[in-house]
Every structure is written in C-alpha cells, then in structure tokens.
Amino acid sequence: MQAGAGQVEELCITGGTVLTMDEAGSLIPDGALLIRQGRIAYCGPTAALPPAADSTRRVLRARGGLIMPGLINAHTHAAMTLMRGLADDLPLDTWLNEHIFPAEKNLTPQAVYWGAMLGCLEMIRSGITAFCDMYLFARQVARAADDAGLRAVLGEVLYDFDSPSYGQIDNGLALTRDFIAELAPHPRLSAAVMPHALYTCSRGLMERAGALSAETGACLDIHLAENREETAQVQKMWGARPLAVLEDLGLVNERLWIDHGVDLNQAEIERLAQAGARVAHCPESNMKLASGVAPLPAMLAAGVKVGLGTDGCASNNDQDLFGEMDSCAKLAKAANLDPTAAPAEAVVGLCTSRGAVAFGLPGELGVLRPGALADVIVLDTDRPHLTPMYNPLSHLVYAARGSDVVHTVCHGRVLMAEGVVEVMDQEEVVAKARQQAMALTGREVL
Ligand SMILES: CSC[C@H]1O[C@@H](n2cnc3c(O)ncnc32)[C@H](O)[C@@H]1O
Ligand SMILES: [Zn+2]
C-alpha cells in the first residue's frame, strides 16, 4: 500500500472489544489493531499499541464498540441489486424462467457494473469485505469489486444457451480461462469456473468446465441441489441425483463449491466432507423461494466447509449477512425442533473463520491475529437495540443489523469510516443503478 491520496502507511483501530474469532474464542477488552501493507501487524490491548513508525498513521476509533473480522459472503450475484423486488413470492422455476432469465437477456456491461457497484456499496455498509459472485459480464463485476476495494472470487456464468455477455459457450469457456489468468496477480480478486446448474448445462459443457478447473486449479462453483424439484429434473435429464452426477464427472473434490445444497442426504453430506468440497448455505433465499431447509447441523457435524451466502437481491432481497445469520440460526432451530441447533458462535463462524475455509483462505481471513489479512469491521454497540451486551456473539446473530457497522476496512484500506463510504460516490451509484434498473426492465421505479 502506498502513502498518498486517501492511503496511509499505517492504520490503527483503537479502543474496542476485539472479537478475534481465533480457535480459543479470545476477546480483547479495550483492544486495538495495527495494520501495515494489508495485514495485521499487532492485535492486543490499546495500551500496548506500538508507537507510530512515521506521521502517516491513520486512526479509526472504535469508541467501545466491537472490532471483528469483515464478513464473508459465500454466494451472491451482486449486480442483481437491479432486480430487487422485481419478482417476489414465486417458486424457483417460475421466478427464474419467467422473470429473471427474460430480464437478463437485456443485460449490458453498464447495467452489470452499476448493479454490482450498488451491491458492493450495500456490502461495505453492512460489513461484508469478501464475496463470491457468479454473473454475466463478470469482468464488470471485477471492475466494481476493484473500484469498491473489496475481496472477491468471481466467475462468468456458463450455460448452454446464448449469453448476452459472450454469445456461444466456446467463448464463455475461453473468457473464463483468460479471466482466471488475468486476475491471478491481483491481491484481492480471483476467478473460478462457474457453470450455472445441472439443468442448464450439458454433459459436454460440464466436462469442459471440470477440465478447466483441474488445469488451472480454480474452483468450480455451481448451483446444486437447490430443491427437490431440481433433483427430480436432474434425475430425469442425467439419470442420477445431482451430487452423483458430479461424482460421475469426477468433480467432487476440494475445488467444488456448491451453492444452496438443500436437497442433500446423509451419504452425500459425508462425501462432501470427505472430498473437502465447499457449500454456500443461503437460508433466506431458500426460504423465500420455498426451496426447503438445508441440512446445516448435519453438514457442520460432518465437517463440511460451509459458508453463509445472501444470494442475489432478487431472491433475498438484501446483502445483509447480519439478517442472514439471524435467519440461519432460527431456521435451523425451527426445522430441527432443537433450540441448540446452529448456536450463535457457530453461525458467526460461518461468516468469519469457518467461512474463510470455504473461501479458500483459512487462517488468513475471518480471524484477527498478527499476520492475517486486514479485513476488519467495527460495530457501534452503544445503541438501544444492542444494550445491554452480555455476549457479543449473541448480539451479532440475534440483535445486530448491517447498519450498526461504522468502519469497514479491506486489505488494510479504509472503505467506510464513521458511516461514510470513502471509495465511491454513494449518490452517484444509487442514481446510476436506478437508471440502469429502469432501462433493464422497462419499468418505472419509485
Ligand atoms: C447468477 S449468474 C447465473 C444465473 O443464476 C441465476 N440465479 C440467481 N439466483 C439463482 C438461484 O437461486 N438458483 C438458480 N439460479 C439463480 C441468475 O439470475 C443468473 O441467470
Ligand atoms: Zn444464486
């Protein structure tokens, strides 16, 4: 990181309770962080903070709030902010085939860029510092994530019908290959191979996608086992359950990243754990599309690498992982008739330390300790709905909101301080996104 316009050599966050999310669950009262070159250099009591090396140190004050790892969003489509509230209260196939796919035929690079900027703005404001995104015109999502200063794994969606982005699938695979190479040197962004789903991709496409993932070492991210209807459709088209199809294709390995994973049986859960595959759990999207309840307690017990995802704004309808954590914990309890299912500590882990394992940066992300990547947020806990605070983990899941985040830092760069986003012009992003939404859907918005 260079000193210069808006950037500093050293960043300190002082005077808050540090929730480290390390294995011991350490809390540091009146703690501080010192950040240099995108990483944490010191994590300990404010009183023992090393003195400034030079005059370019910037200080963010936590004022008794909570200093914690930035949240990791394991599955989203950031540009789908443009379709927030466009088609609600519908089942997945009707929602997708009759509303979302037709709207996406009109997508342009500009629409995706401004939609993704709006998604990034929403994520910064609610404490998300890393996300995994599948969409069309993925280079525009990369441009937005880069402009926003966020960390991301990105991919161009691949399917067998013509894409408004790349046309025919040969171009989509070539684009993915180039995209992986282009992003490889980037400190915060990387690319993955992203076939949409088994009901939109042929065997030939899946084989080529798998070969590209094996050749490059990039993850293969796919919507899988989202509901029982999908399983029935895949059984009809492919002659086997979704995970068995991937097994037959040789794709069940540590690079596999499945989104939703609702209709999984115990044997499939154990296979995912044994293979080291990742699952993005998206409880709010699964509830809204009535897809069902993913077997979260069984996945956690089996040791599957699970992260928490918001999914896109057309099926959620926001990018707030605090709300998602609340839904995640309560849904698991209600569905299993067990109040101990998905306890607060485990659910915060899904967005931090455990989420980092799914994200592919175990121990580097989702934890505050010297040497870790400096993705950090601060919550103002001096608010009526967060008073009193016996246990920060409880508040994060059951009481806090994205709007309680006051400072957001990613890779050592301040993205938001005192509630003011510093990396983009918020009014411009909102206005441009509104214009693009109207152009995309042909509908007036309020
Ligand atoms: C997002 S790029 C690929 C494609 O996926 C569509 N999509 C968004 N959410 C879901 C979901 O929950 N299941 C299946 N497909 C989904 C999106 O609109 C894009 O067309
Ligand atoms: Zn999705």
Image (cartoon, rainbow, N blue to C red):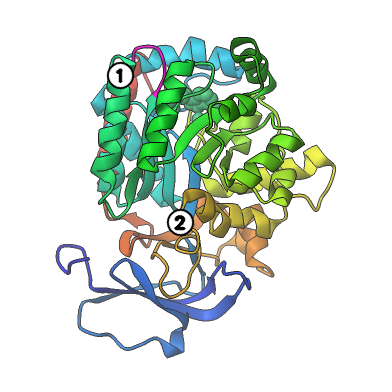
| Left or right of residue 256, residue 150 in this image | left
Question: What kind of residue is marked 1?
Answer: Asp
Look at 27% across and 28% down and name the residue there.
Answer: 175
Look at 31% across and 88% down and name the residue there.
Answer: 51
Measured as percent of width and height from the top left, residue 224 is found at: 58, 28
Measured as percent of width and height from the top left, residue 341 is found at: 77, 50
The image quadrant that residue 271 belongs to is top right
Quadrant placement of the C terminus: top left
Residue 160 is a magenta residue: yes
Measured as percent of width and height from the top left, residue 275 is found at: 60, 44
Point out the frontmost of discs 1 and 2. Answer: 1
Measured as percent of width and height from the top left, residue 409 is found at: 37, 61
Residue at mark 2: 361
Tell me which segment is drawn in magenta. Answer: 158-165
The image quadrant that residue 344 belongs to is bottom right
Q: Which mark is residue 170?
A: 1
> Dot 2, crowdedness within 10 Å: few (<14), some or many (≥20)?
some
Q: CA separation, marks 1 and 2? A: 31 Å
Residue 74 is a magenta residue: no
Check the image and report above or below for 132 versus 95. Answer: below
Question: What kind of residue is marked 2?
Answer: Leu
Viewer-side residue, 343 vs 288: 343
Mark closer to the chain start, 1 or 2: 1
